[in-house]
Amino acid sequence: MMMMMMMERKVFSLLVIWFLVSHVVLKKCDAIWMTVPATGTKCVSEELQNNVVVLADYVVVSENDHSHLTPTIAAKVTSPYGNTLHNKENTTNGQFAFTTKEAGNYLACFWVDGHNPGGGDVSINLDWRTGIAAKDWESVARKEKIEGVELELRKLEGAVEAIHENLLYLKNREAEMRMVSESTNSRVAWLSIMSLGVCIAVSTLQIWHLKRFFQKKKLI
């Protein structure tokens, strides 16, 4: 009886942890509602580390029921180094998926592409998912034949791994920033010493020049 109670408490604790973790990690799968101007571009970006799965769907939200009256847009996704990961024109919806190869800001831009019967702003619904939020858990459950609490624990494991990877990434970034800061401080210190040396040398040269000038004039 005591073992059963301990197991129930353990499962309950894990579920509470999963609930808290899901609000930190899985919140990244929220949809974004954007308004794209008729003559401009609207972009969204997210800073991602290397080897992160990204999955996104976008669709033009139109008040008209007729498809021929729905405005068309163009979409382009680029990596931090400017590589094009997705490019689609003259469309009302689309999807892109990729695994990041570079760490940095990934940019997704949208603009009205020609066909816009109303001539006004265009609304777009973007569902942007990254990391564990982009994983197809239904396929995992079917493949591994798990469900219920076991599936939730599997999700919890993935969320903990994602948090661990994010912490390692932040730790590495902090170390890189510290190295850059130390290097900058060292260069500034050397520059200050060189500047002081130059000032002393110039002052000494000026004194020597003035002394010779006064000696030639027989003032001293």
Image: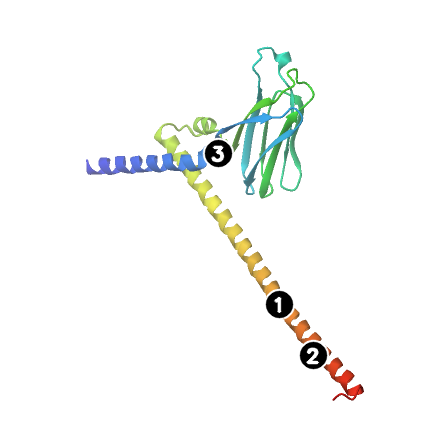
Q: Amino acid at mark 2?
A: Thr
In space, the residues marked 1 and 2 are separated at their CA atoms by 18 Å
Left or right, 205 with respect to 139, comes to: right
Label 1: which residue? Answer: 192
Residue at the location (45% across, 33% down)? 27
In space, the residues marked 2 and 3 are separated at their CA atoms by 65 Å
Residue 36: % across, % down: 61, 26
Of the image marks 2 and 3, the number of the one nearer the N terminus: 3
Q: Amino acid at mark 3?
A: Lys
Does residue 175 sit above or below 117 in this rendering?
A: below
What SS does tag 3 mark? helix
Residue 32: % across, % down: 52, 28
Q: Residues within 10 Å of mark 2 (few under 14, many from 20)?
A: few
Label 2: which residue? Answer: 204
Which quarter of the picture shows residue 219? bottom right
Residue 57: % across, % down: 56, 26
